[in-house]
Image: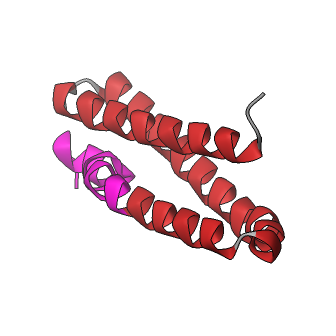
């Protein structure tokens, strides 16, 4: 049976898959379709909130517990968080609220 670190790896893989989905959705988005723009905007906001809560939970609860027994594991996941942030930049630049509205022609 996979352990908790497997579950954590699974979640981080899912995060990256979702980011690729945002990039794909943003490139196919018709900027004149206000419903689609709004839907992607809401999806992005919910995802960004999830990421914030997920990383906060790991940083305050999970990682301190792991660090006591396996400090190198925490260092690896810290690097994983940094990679998530790098992967989020392209999506954030397109999917952020102000950018979606700008693509629609609103300022």
Q: Is residue 106 magenta?
A: yes
Residue 94 inside the magenta-drawn segment: yes
- Main secondary structure along the magenta-highlighted residues: helix
- Residue in front for this viewpoint, 59 or 8: 8
Quadrant in the picture for the C terminus = bottom left
In the rendered image, which quarter is residue 62 located in? bottom right
Residue 68 in picture, x, y percent from top left: 82, 76
The residue lying at 54 percent from left, 45 percent from top is 12
Q: Picture coordinates of residue 32 (x, y %)?
A: 19, 28
Q: How is the image coloured?
A: secondary structure
> How far across and how far down the image is residue 87, in percent?
33, 54
Residue at image coords 50%, 63%: 81
Residue 47, position as x, y percentages in the image: 53, 43
Q: Is 83 in front, or is 72? A: 72
Q: Quadrant of residue 104?
A: top left
Q: How many marks?
A: 0
In the image, which residues are magenta? 86-107
The image quadrant where one finds the N terminus is top right
Determine if residue 91 is in view.
Answer: yes
Q: Is residue 77 above or below residue 7?
A: below
Pick the front one: 22 or 87: 87
Q: Is residue 42 visible?
A: no
Is 57 left or right of 85, judged from the image as shown? right
- Quick check: 33 above or below 13? above
Residue 14 falls left or right of residue 106: right
């Amino acid at each position: 049976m996979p352990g908790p670190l497997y579950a954590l790896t699974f979640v981080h893989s899912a995060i990256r898959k979702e980011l690729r989905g945002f990039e794909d959705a943003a490139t196919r988005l018709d900027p004149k379709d206000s419903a689609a723009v709004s839907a992607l905007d809401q999806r992005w906001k919910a995802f960004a909130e999830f990421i914030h809560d997920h990383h906060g939970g790991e940083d305050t609860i999970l990682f301190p517990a792991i660090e006591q027994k396996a400090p190198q594991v925490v260092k690896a996941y810290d690097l994983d968080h940094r990679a998530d942030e790098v992967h989020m930049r392209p999506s954030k630049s397109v999917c952020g609220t102000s950018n979606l509205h700008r693509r629609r022609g609103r300022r």
